[in-house]
Each structure stands twice: as structure tokens, then as C-alpha cells.
Image (cartoon, rainbow, N blue to C red):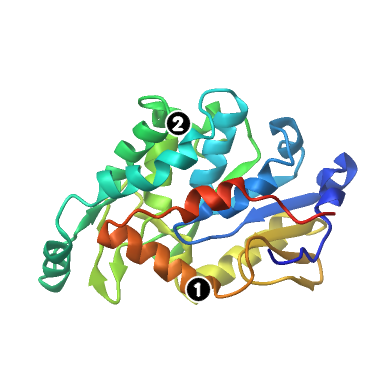
Amino acid sequence: MGALAFPICELEQEELRRKSVLVLRGTGFNFWHYLPLLRNFRLDDLAQFQAIYTISGSTLLLWLYCLMEQGVITMSAASAYDRAMRHCLNRHGCMERVARMLTGRYPYRAEDFLRVFDLLTVPEAWRQTLDQLPLQNWRVVAHEESRQELLVLDPQANPTFAVGEVISRAVTWSRLFHLPFCWRTPYHGMLIGDFDFAGARVHRQFYEHLRAVHASAQVYQINRFRNEDRGAHHFIRVGPGRLVRFWQIIDFAAFYLGIANPRYLRAATRELPER
């Protein structure tokens, strides 16, 4: 486990949380690395941050964590995640998926994630709308693929958006190696896509958004790659610090090939380093 650059116990102070923004950055398929950190906070604690921004897979994790804290689901979701992903999303055989990509067809559909959510939570919990979330300071960071513009979706601006419809699009990307990968339909007139697969211009827009909206706040960016302080931005690496990109590729390959992956449950049940 990589050491934390910033002692997490300081974020357990209410006074500091109220002056801070929490950003959960993308993780790859194994977003469970962030669960041990989230378990340090009750929902009331998380609600005290000025805002919580989630990117890519961390959006699904935070929603699942809210359901755990509300007693709707248990840690069994971490056990069920691997099989649910492989069973619900790999509708075509491995070679057929390759053939579809090479012939300009999509092997995956974002809407199939709704079936994953039904297996991980109670049926159709994903129909919960953003204004029904227990964290009204939650912001989902995505991008509008057709315009290549930043999208920040939240309960105030997008109250009637269904959580599952947003997450299924915010955690998937349209193209892989310039080939069609995951089809999605517009939602409320927007072609929502995974922020991590947006261009540099969209990433700059997000930093500009943070500076404009939270000019006086300290920003704690939970990530998989680095511990670093850059002015008001504190990057805190969570999870093993070695070969992160390699293991992200392994997780993707296991999913794509339909191979069981025990790494998700191990990540979810790992303890944070001693303070």
C-alpha cells in the first residue's frame, strides 16, 4: 500500500471538510481501491465537504457506498461485481466482439450497465434521481462527446436525471484505439461520456471549473498514481503504488476475456495504512 501524502485523519475534522473539496478520480475497472478510504466517513461527514466530484468508476463506487451506508445493500456487492460485469456486459463472444469492432460495430452498450446495477443493488434502484441522493453536494464529472465539452451533473442543475442513466454513460467510453467500443444513446439531449477519455481541452476545463467555483477551497484529489501537493491541490494516492497501469490493463483483460478476477474483493476489504 502506498503511503498517503496527507494524513486522512485530518479530513475527519469537520472544520477542514467544510473548507475543502473532495475529488475521486478515475480508477480503471477496480474502483474498489477507494472503498477503504470512504469507510472513514459517514454520509453526514461526506455531506460537509463543499463538493464531492466523482470521475469515471468512482461515480459508481460512491453511489454503492451511499446505498451501503443507508442499509440498502451490503459488502456482498463487492463480491458480486466481477461476475455481474462479465455476465451482463459480454453479450457477444470474445472473437465476435473483436470482429464487431473491426467492422465498425459496437461490441458493448452503455444501457447494459443497468442490468449490472440490478444485480449489485435492489431491482431498479438505479431509477433514483439525483435530487433523491443523500449527498446533495455530489457532482458527476463527465464530458459531452459530440461537442467535446466538460459536463458537471449535479442534483441542483439536473434533479430529475436518473442515477443509473448517468452512471452507465459516465463510466463508459465510445471508442477504443479509434475503433467503436461502447454505444450510448443521448440522454436529455446530451451524449454523456467518461471524462477520463476526453481530450486535454476538457481536462483543462475541469481545472478551470474548480478554480472558478471553489477559489478559496483546498482540493483533495484521491487518485491511483501520485502523492503530491500543488498549491491548493493535494493529490493523495490510494491503493498499491507499483505497476498501477499494468494492473489496470490486467483487470480490463480479465473482464474482456471473461476470466474471474478476485482483485476487486481484495481491494474492497484492504485496510488503509496505519495513521
Q: Which of 267 and 181 is in front in this view?
A: 267
> Where residue 49 is drawn, which disc sits there?
none
- Side of 222 relative to 33 (left or right): right
* Image x and y of residue 160, in percent: 45, 31
- Assign a secondary structure to mark 1: helix
Residue under the image location 84 percent in, 57 percent down: 7
Circle nearer the N terminus (2, 1): 2
Amino acid on which disc 2 is placed: Thr
Residue under the image location 62 percent in, 71 percent down: 225
> Where residue 160 is drawn, which disc sits there?
2
Amino acid on which disc 1 is placed: Arg
Image position of 53 with respect to 181: above or below? above
- Assign a secondary structure to mark 2: loop
- Side of 33 relative to 29 (left or right): right
* Image x and y of residue 249, in percent: 41, 70
Asked whether residue 236 is in view, the answer is yes
Residue under the image location 50 percent in, 68 percent down: 202
Residue corresponding to mark 1: 245
